Image (cartoon, helix red, strand yellow):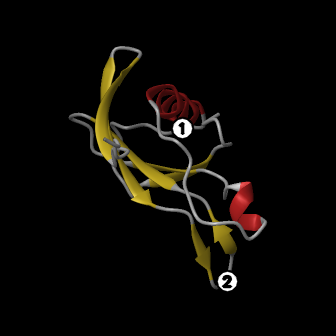
Amino acid sequence: MSRSQPNAGEIVVDGNTYDWHLQSEPHLSDDEGWKGMTIGLREQGAKREAFVQFPAPKRLLRGLPRGRLQLDEPTIARSIRAALAAGWDPMSRGRPMTFMVDAEGN
């Protein structure tokens, strides 16, 4: 029996609970070329969402079949910490902020 990868979930990072969801799969953009997977993050009870964009997988750049990075708890936790370190304030108001991370979420 195969397990499908979750597209949303909840994670506790440094004592705060965050909801995350897959915003977009890796895809080919007409004007920007290959774009990586994007996940949306929101601290529970907070107002401002953050989008974390990963680089396009190298297999896409080489013309191999599609696929996405594995979303595991350590990668999502590193992504949350990277967004917070880059200036994301979940309690502020405003449009969602977008952050670029590496394949490991740093």
Type of amino acid at the residue the image marks with label 2: Asp
> Helix or strand or loop: what does disc 2 sit on?
loop
From the viewer's side, name the closer residue of 65 and 50: 65
Type of amino acid at the residue the image marks with label 1: Ala
Which of the two discs, 2 and 1, labels the residue nearer the N terminus? 2
Picture residue at 58% right of the left edge, 49% below the top: 99
- Mark 1 highlights which residue? 83
Which quadrant of the figure contains the N terminus?
top left
- Mark 2 highlights which residue? 31
Q: How many marks?
A: 2
Q: Quadrant of residue 41?
A: top left
Which quadrant of the figure contains the C terminus?
top right
Give the x, y percent position of residue 30.
Answer: 63, 85
Picture residue at 41% right of the left edge, 15% below the top: 14
How many C-alpha atoms fall within 10 Å of the one at disc 2: few (<14), some, or many (≥20)?
A: few
- Check the image and name the residue furthest to the top: 15
Give the x, y percent position of residue 17.
Answer: 29, 26
Picture residue at 38% right of the left edge, 45% below the top: 5
Give the x, y percent position of residue 20.
Answer: 34, 42
> Helix or strand or loop: what does disc 1 sit on?
helix
Q: CA distance from mark 2 to mark 1?
A: 26 Å
| Above-or-below relation of 38 to 9 | below
